[in-house]
Amino acid sequence: MSPETDTGTDAVSAEPASPSSSINPDSVRAIAKKDFQDAVRSWLFWGLSVFFFTLLVTITGVVSYFGEDIAQAGATTEALVVFVSEITRLVIPLIALILGWKAIAGERERGSIKILLSLPHSRKDVLLGKLIGRSAVLSISLIVGFVLAAVVVAAMLGAFDVADYVGLLAMSILYGVAYTSIAVALSSLTRSTTVAGAAMVGVFVLFYIVWNAINTTFQLLMNQGYIAGETYTIDTDDGPMEFERLPDWAYFVESIDPGYAYNNALSIVTSAAETELGVAIEDAMFDGSVPFYLQDWFSFVVLLFWIVVPIAVALYRFDRVDL
């Protein structure tokens, strides 16, 4: 039995936990339940629910007021998905990173992690429980906000596509859980909330600012001759014209960004798909054989990667750190 699961007087050991510390589903569930209940008591959960409700209603009002042509075309929910996804691509990571910021680092800084581990909980139980609890706060607040807004949204839009609306909700939850996993994992690897906070800022800057500009940066480097591009031909009214694109690896780097994957995955679960022109150009760029990592289905693999890998690394590392 590992030091964390021993209920005797030596429940908290000064030595790092054994790598074989087990996972107790009941223990994980208990920690997740307490984490969620704490969020409800602090009004964090209700605050997030109101935020998502207000976001949806506000964007719907803008679409319905300024988008008469869109409404007449019967594509109002599709427009809503496009507008909302651009905003949630920014706000969901911010919320998830804030939720996960103090998940473990706060407990370590206060010393309460040792009290928690003096109960029959292993370190893995604590880490998984925190991940599930924080993910539940974000996911259920999204569900409550979307459900409460559904009636108002349907009334304001006139043409309301339930499948698109549910698809947007489902992908937003998956996207949020990915960032929550990253946040909780980083929180478990830091001793203080200050360092953890800096790590969260670094993650946000990396994915939302650096990664969004990475394709433009590669393009500039290619134009300057630092990166060798690939040529392709497009038939135009004036005859075949030759263009240059980035090498395959540059597109792969861009594709593993969670935000990029989130937008691409929406093309599968909603009607907010790429334009025919965009698809035609992409086919021409890759001679009709678009790489697997640029296909929409791969976006689900990317999001699952960002859920599983960070927490898997944290489970391995957190068992070995000195608390």
Image (cartoon, helix red, strand yellow):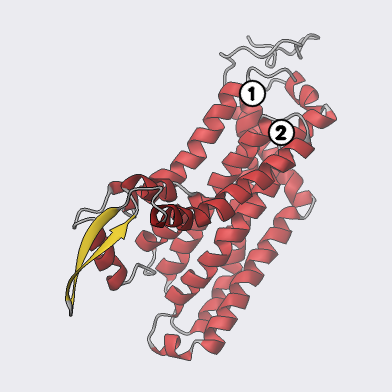
Element type where label 2 sits in the image = loop
Which residue is denoted by mark 1 in the rendering? Answer: 318
- Amino acid residing under circle 1: Phe
Left or right: where 248 falls relative to 83: left
- Provide residue 6's location: percent of width, then percent of height: 70, 12
* C-alpha distance separating marks 2 and 1: 10 Å
Q: Is residue 66 visible?
A: yes
Residue extending farthest right: 110
Mark 2, other Cα within 10 Å: few <14 / some 14–19 / many ≥20 = many
Q: Mark 2 — residue? A: 104
Q: Nearer the viewer, residue 114 or 305?
A: 305
Q: Between disc 2 and disc 1, whose residue precedes?
A: 2
x 60%, y 56%: residue: 92
Q: Is residue 315 above or below residue 213?
A: above
Q: Are dots 2 and 1 in contact, CB under 8 Å?
A: yes
Q: Residue at x 65, y 23 (%)?
A: 123
Residue plotted at (44% across, 86% down): 71
Residue 177 x %, y %:
55, 46
Considering the numbered disc 1 on the image, is that residue within a helix, a strand or a loop? Answer: helix
User: Could you tell me which quadrant the C terminus lies in?
Assistant: top right
Q: Nearer the viewer, residue 284 or 84?
A: 284
